[in-house]
Amino acid sequence: MSFTLLMLAPVLIPALGAVTCAVFGWRRATAWIGVACAAAVLAAGVVLAAETTLTGPRTSLGGQLRVDALSAFMLIVIGAISVLATAASPAWLRTEITAGRANHRSARWHSLLVQAFVAAMALAVLAANLGTVWVAVEATTIITAFLVGQRRTRAAVEAGWKYVVICSVGIALAFLGAVLLNYASAHAGAAGAGLAGNRLDWAALAAGAHSLDPGVTRIAVALLIIGFGTKAGLAPLHAWLPDAHGQAPAPVSALMSGVLLSVAFYAILRVKVIADAALGVAFTRTLLAVIALATLAIAASLLLAQRDYKRMLAYSSIEHMGLLALGAAAGSRLALAAVLLHVLGHGLGKAVLFLSSGRILQVTGTSQIGKVRGLATRQPLLAGCFGLGVLALIGLPPFSLFASGFGIARAGFAEGLGWVTAASFVFVLVIAAAVLTHTGRMLLGPPPPSDAPATDPADRGAVNLALPASGAVPLLVGLTACAALGITLGPLQQLLHSAATLVGTP
Amino acid sequence: MTQTTFSQLLYLACGAFLLAAVLVLWRRELAAIVRLFALQGVALTGIVAVLAAHERSLELGLVAAGIAGLRAVLLPYLVRRALDRAGPGRETKPLVNVAASLLAAAVLTLVAYAVSQPLIALAPSPATRAVPVGLAVVLIGFFVLVTRRRALSQVVGFLLIDNGITAIAFLTTAGVPLIVELGVSLDVLFAALVLQVLTTRMRATFGHTDLDELRELRDA
């Protein structure tokens, strides 16, 4: 009973938080509810991780929820990044309200939807059933649609429209894949007797995968990978991502980039386990390697001439998702451990970057790279966080993305994906150079002469305030965590190992 | 019900289901497109009802009633309401003209039949032999989505895809688990609501719902 409650906590607590925000509205006290709920998700993730490494996978609620090392790890990722994003939200919202771009009503909606978003993502990683995962992932699309279009400007409405249409269609493909997998498992024959009754259950599907019809399973797996890949920002249906990340409020961009993409990628990893057992590793390996290369190529080509820094960060998320796909294509345990560490490191780094980019937007009033100059002299702390975040992102030590990127590369060469890996890392180098150049233009140099804050105070609001402590702490904590992970994994080592054993080929 | 009547009724419903999708490509009046979409919802209900009668399953019968409520009444009503707010509209400049669209629908149907051979081979039966129809509707829905320029036509395209997938779900295994079907229906309903809200906002900020005007966000 208590274990059922523990498993329900990551879904129920943010859901209750959403209700509380809805009832009490935006106040000084409720502003911090989000952080409390996110911290509860993180704590539940840690406890569940400790439990599962001791006792193995556990189910509850009549087999509807299931937690193993991989789900527990994903819960920790969701919790950690939500803590950063929600901790930075009050300062961000307060500035928006002062500047007249938001009011108490939209702040209430913001807090409510963010909590519901966290609850849906927690459900997606805890669900034992492919169908429930699908429902939860589609629910995140619907919840965040309002967050993306919150500002009601032309650009925001356009981004919201593209987001809902492309993601819903992409995820519909995944549902078609789920339907076909359900069909295959219904006709799995005597060897698949364990599939009766729970035909979409992850564990039952993985155990009975060898008895699935290969012809139908191949179509189903391709649809599932492309469908969930849409939501993960992988090619070919990635076009929603830069628009949505660019237009969403900064804390929401941080959540979307840091966790939503990884939650969708988690579904791909689960599908891959079934596909590898049913079809052999070659099918998903080829599919994922092609997707990874296409994704990296697109990210590199569009980053070179990027002029908007929020879109630059969005394309960098696409790049990192491509790297994850490359690691999954390699598929060994080493590769998967690196992939999971990359998920956490990228989530932390990207959350810091999106949160600081939101602050840069508030301070400078522009999202154009060319118009933000000399930030280092005007806002040293903010510029420092942004700069360090970018260094983390392009994989410089001591940040953990160095270790995980290196691990993915090594696994790629070891698993016979030499050419694909080499080509991928050429793209990664090009992207690193482009991102560094753009960032250098933003942070260095003299401040623009037109930087007169008093020109239009009504429009720019409280622009030249120094970064408030409640806005700075999440940035520093995120950077520190990302660097600490690069130096030592500590207790996470065991968890990563168990999770990689679940999804990696030996 | 004898096996022959079952197959004949099933194929009749599937035929109407496919025809409704093809006619969406033919008509340009948005109001007519919404009516055709409602008609397709009725055909989908027919497919599920025939399957329910064949398997003598009360649960499936109730699901059929739910599908009728959602896809033949509620969703068309929502789209219709959004249309009424926008005033009468026509699909004035689709990227592909009507004649070429109809030819494309024929090609897509052939493709659907070719692709679904492994699906039929796994468990040949009158129901699985109709699976290509569902797939054809999915593909036609995609085609509507990429070639039509009005926001409401795109919503209908998305809903066509969803109808097609639901048809495949019932034709292959008499449906996915009930809790999943419920969740999926709720998600689709909410997606339609979100799109309706966005259409309203789009008209408030752009003055109309022509997606050609969506040009704010692009690279370089």
Image (spheres, grey):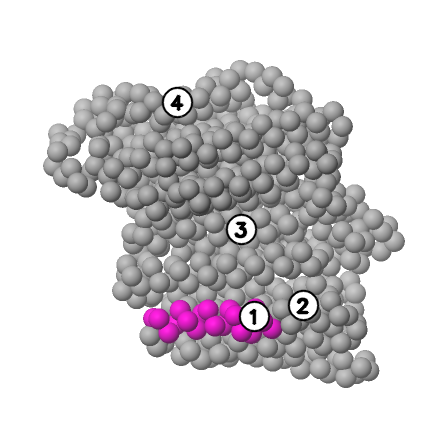
Check disc 2 and report the residue beneath it: B63
Check disc 1 and report the residue beneath it: B71
A466 versus A288 height, above or below? above
- Chain designation of label 1: B
Please identify the quadrant where the C terminus of chain A is shown.
Answer: top right
Query: Which of disc 1 and disc 2 is earlier in sequence?
Result: 2
Please tell me if label 3 and label 1 are on a single chain. Answer: no
Residue stretch in magenta: B68-86
User: Which residue: 44% across, 58% down?
Assistant: B194
Position of residue A356 measured from the top left corner of the image (x, y, whole percent): 35, 30
- Chain designation of label 4: A
Which residue is farthest right?
A190
A269 versus A352 height, above or below? below
Q: Residues within 10 Å of mark 2 (few under 14, many from 20)?
A: some
In whole angstroms, how far apart are the C-alphas of marks 4 and 2? 52 Å
Secondary structure beneath dot 1 equals helix
- Chain designation of label 2: B
Position of residue A506 in the picture relative to residue A310 (left or right): right
Q: Residues within 10 Å of mark 3 (few under 14, many from 20)?
A: many
In whole angstroms, how far apart are the C-alphas of marks 2 and 3? 22 Å
In whole angstroms, how far apart are the C-alphas of marks 2 and 1? 12 Å
Q: Amino acid at mark 1?
A: Arg
B173 versus A341 height, above or below? below
Position of residue A55 measured from the top left corner of the image (x, y, whole percent): 76, 28
Please tell me if label 3 and label 4 are on a single chain. Answer: yes
B99 versus A233 height, above or below? below
* Label at residue A139: 3
In whole angstroms, how far apart are the C-alphas of marks 1 and 4? 50 Å
Check disc 4 and report the residue beneath it: A473
Please identify the quadrant where the N terminus of chain A is shown.
Answer: top right
| Most frequent secondary structure within the magenta stretch | helix
